[in-house]
Amino acid sequence: MARPELRSGHILSVFSYAQTWSYRERHPEGDELAVLLDGHVELLTVSGESEEAVTLRSLWGYVIPAGVWHRVRVHEPSTLLFITPTPARTEHESLLAHHGENPSAATR
């Protein structure tokens, strides 16, 4: 039997990254909260034709508005906590053809 409470709310996840994401993603259904637990990263959000960087320090968070493409640039191994809206529909787009960096995606 499906549990009705799982159709709404938020998903909490924690991921560790050693390298910059080779993709970007967005969540059309709602805002996502990203909190840096340890390490050093920049959260890159797309605004028009450019990316805007937000540096996260340990235990700092940032709310990524619904529908905004974003990715993480990793400066040292880092762990992030994400609170994602449900239904957790996430769209991904590869950046390997778009950027000179040769990043690889981490466990996410």
Image: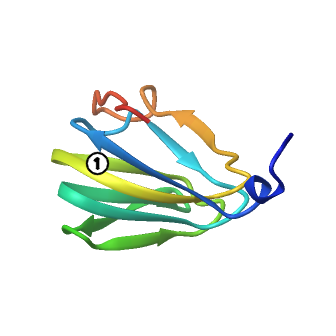
Is 93 placed left or right of 73 in the picture? right
* Residue 106 lies in quadrant: top left
* Secondary structure found at label 1: strand
Q: Is residue 56 above or below residue 46?
A: below
Q: Position of residue 69 (x, y in %)?
A: 55, 53
| Residue displayed at 57% across by 35% down | 93
Q: Is residue 77 left or right of residue 49?
A: left
Q: Residue furthest front?
A: 1
Q: Nearer the viewer, residue 70 or 15?
A: 15
- Depth order, front residue of 25/77: 77
Q: How many marks?
A: 1
**Is 28 left, or right, of 93 in this rendering?**
right
Colour mapping used in the image: rainbow
Placement of 95 over or under 32, stated as above or below: above
Picture quadrant where residue 101 is located: top left
Question: Residue placed at 70% from the left, 46% from the top?
Answer: 89
Query: Which quarter of the figure is the C terminus placed in?
Result: top left
Hey, what amino acid is under mark 1?
Arg
Give percent across and percent down for residue 82.
45, 57
Q: Which residue is mark 1?
A: 73
Q: Quadrant of the N terminus?
A: top right
State the residue at coordinates (19%, 67%).
58
Front residue (pair 18, 54) = 18
Asked if residue 9 lies left or right of residue 78, the reply is right
Q: Residues within 10 Å of mark 1 (few under 14, many from 20)?
A: many
Residue 14 on image: x %, y %: 38, 49
Residue drawn at the location 30% of the way across and 31% of the way down: 103
